[in-house]
């Protein structure tokens, strides 16, 4: 992958975590939690934005994605030990966390359970805890569901569609775009399944335990995550600051500049 060197950390239990770093040496560290599904390889506009932010972004593949060792049955809160291994390997005592969509709960877990080391937390289009009364499907059923979604997305790409919804150009003509898409929708199936289970079950921490500054951003026309999810997080996280941007699930460059400014202020 051009401009995205891969590194890895081996946890004390032998599990491998793979990651990329975007941003300058000496920039304030931020650990970024990918959405569901997604990988450490960010599309060019976002990668360039992170590099120019002045922050040092560490973007890692949660277990089951991109060569990071799968851990079936993991909870959202289990991300804390992964992040601890990553930041300790970097020598980061203090850092911020960020998470988008299904990655937001994993960032919030760090804010709740690593509050002595986390300086602030950014939530972008984040989801709320699942309804505990809703039945969770078995793995075979869930895997079939996500495989169907992946096949539909990759089918549109093969027909000449863009890498991202609303984007331009044919992703099939861009080797880097195809590598990102395959990592997400083909090779990341185990991580996608395990993330889906983790989000559908108790997260392993309480939102009310968060004591670090949290900034939440949501789009006015997000069709992936309903506004009620943002309203729930705003109600249950102490001191959270809500922000709204014009657009859908993914923010544009102006919103990322706003997020970087908020991080600098914390």
Image (spheres, rainbow, N blue to C red):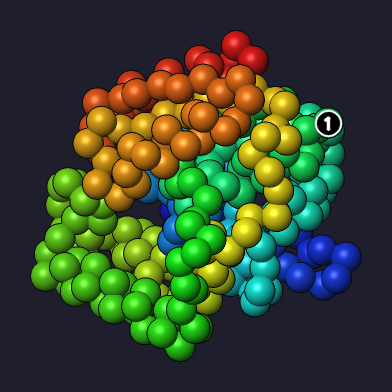
* Image spot of residue 39 (x, y percent): 49, 58
User: In the image, 61: left or right of 139?
Assistant: right
Question: Is residue 179 in view?
Answer: no
Tell me: residue 109, above or below residue 74. Answer: above
Q: Residues within 10 Å of mark 1 (few under 14, many from 20)?
A: few
Give the residue displayed 33% in from the left and 37% down from the top. 227
Which residue of the protein is positioned furthest toward the right in this rendering?
A: 12
User: In the image, 87: left or right of 235?
Assistant: right
Q: What is the number of callouts on the image? A: 1
Which residue of the protein is positioned furthest toward the bottom in this rendering?
A: 140
Give the residue displayed 45% in from the left and 88% down from the top. 140
Give the residue displayed 71% in from the left and 48% down from the top. 205
* Image spot of residue 5 (x, y percent): 57, 53
* Image spot of residue 89 (x, y percent): 82, 48
Question: Is residue 220 in view?
Answer: yes
User: In the image, 94: left or right of 46?
Assistant: right
* Image spot of residue 220 (x, y percent): 25, 30
Give the residue displayed 45% in from the left and 46% down from the top. 127
Q: Quadrant of residue 78?
A: bottom right
Tell me: residue 81, above or below residue 144. Answer: above
Residue denoted by label 1: 116
User: In the image, 136: left or right of 209?
Assistant: left
């Amino acid at each position: 992958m051009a401009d995205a060197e891969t590194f890895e950390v081996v946890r004390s239990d032998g599990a491998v975590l793979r990651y990329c770093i975007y941003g300058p040496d000496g920039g304030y560290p931020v650990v970024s939690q990918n959405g569901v599904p997604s990988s450490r390889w960010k599309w060019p506009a976002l990668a360039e934005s992170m590099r120019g932010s002045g922050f040092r972004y560490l973007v890692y593949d949660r277990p089951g994605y991109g060569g990071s060792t799968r851990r079936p049955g993991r909870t959202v809160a289990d991300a804390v030990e992964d992040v601890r291994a990553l930041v300790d390997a970097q020598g980061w005592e203090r850092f911020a966390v960020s998470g988008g969509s299904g990655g937001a709960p994993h960032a919030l877990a760090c804010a709740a359970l690593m509050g002595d080391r986390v300086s602030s937390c950014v939530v972008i289009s984040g989801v709320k805890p699942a309804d505990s009364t809703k039945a969770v499907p078995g793995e075979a059923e869930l895997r079939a569901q996500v495989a169907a979604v992946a096949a539909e997305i990759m089918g549109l790409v093969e027909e000449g569609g863009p890498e991202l919804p609303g984007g331009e150009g044919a992703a099939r003509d861009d080797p880097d775009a195809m590598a990102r898409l395959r990592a997400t929708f083909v090779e990341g199936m185990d991580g996608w399944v395990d993330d889906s289970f983790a989000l559908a079950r108790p997260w392993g921490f309480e939102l009310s335990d968060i004591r670090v500054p949290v900034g939440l951003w949501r789009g006015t026309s997000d069709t992936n995550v309903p506004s009620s999810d943002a309203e729930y997080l705003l109600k249950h996280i102490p001191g959270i600051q809500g922000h709204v941007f014009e657009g859908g699930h993914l923010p544009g460059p102006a919103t990322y500049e706003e997020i970087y400014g908020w991080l600098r202020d914390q």
